[in-house]
Image: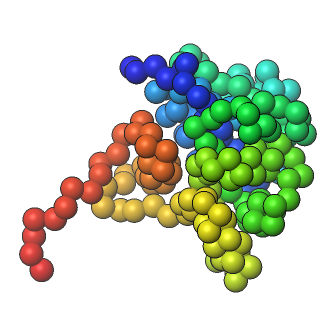
Amino acid sequence: MQSHSQDRPLIVGITGASGLIYAVRTLKFLLEAGYTVDVVASKAAFMVWQAEHQMRMPVDPIQQEQFWRQQARVETGGKLRCHAWGNVGATIASGSFRTLGMIIIPCSMSTVGKLANGLSSDLLERAADVQLKEGRKLVLVPRETPFSLIHLRNLTTLAEAGARIVPAIPAWYHQPRSIEDLVDFVIARSLDQFEIDCVPLHRWSGSTEEL
């Protein structure tokens, strides 16, 4: 396994959009591949986790690190640091703290709206704003349907500002056989934006049949 533990970290933001399995499996693949990951979950993410899994996510950053490792089933490997959503003095709040960029997975429309209008009310939003102002990669994985015109305009604003929008829309050409296969396709395409290839995926290799 190639180690990336000494490299610049990738920030993983987790919001209150439904589908937190996307976040769990993203952490799984990154940690298994030896990446350094800084995690910040929004306040709403705690409530959605409770609703989706009938269990509480710990607020304390140290306990949360162990929590995410248990959920991802990666006890060792990589480096994981968690930050409280209200700690706007954390390393990832500063542009002088160098990173690979940030992925927000899943990304709520509330977060999209705030980022599109330059609002930073917590650490997750501040860290995302920093990536934009520093010209670093910011990947948003919105999990919402249908999109309203307001959603589409906000996403367009962020795309124009340099963010990459990767909706949680799976494909079927890789012959998925489980929910995890569908989730992993979205994660693979999201991490492709950072040129990170750590998710096992049968990629499209072209068709030899003529129509």
Residue at screen point 88% across, 33% down = 89
| Any part of residue 14 in sight | no
Front-most of 42 and 177? Answer: 42
User: Which residue sits at x=75%, y=51%?
Assistant: 129
Q: Please identify the quadrant where the C terminus is shown.
A: bottom left
Image check: 205 left or right of 85?
A: left
* Furthest residue toward bottom: 149
| Residue 131, above or below 167 | above
Res 12 visible: yes
Percent across and percent down for residue 8 are 59, 28
Colour scheme of the rendered structure: rainbow
Compared to residue 115, the image places residue 148 above or below, namely below
Residue 148 locus on image (x, y percent): 70, 80
Q: Quadrant of the N terminus?
A: top left
Tell me what residue is drawn at x 59 percent, y 53 percent: 139
Give above or below for 116 relative to 179.
below
* Left or right of residue 173, residue 169 in this image: right
Depth order, front residue of 74/37: 37
Residue projecting furthest to the top: 76
What is the count of numbered marks? 0
Where is residue 154? Give x, y as percent.
71, 72
Looking at this view, is 153 or 108 the one in front?
A: 153
Q: Nearer the viewer, residue 120 or 171?
A: 120
Q: Position of residue 133 (x, y in %)?
A: 71, 51
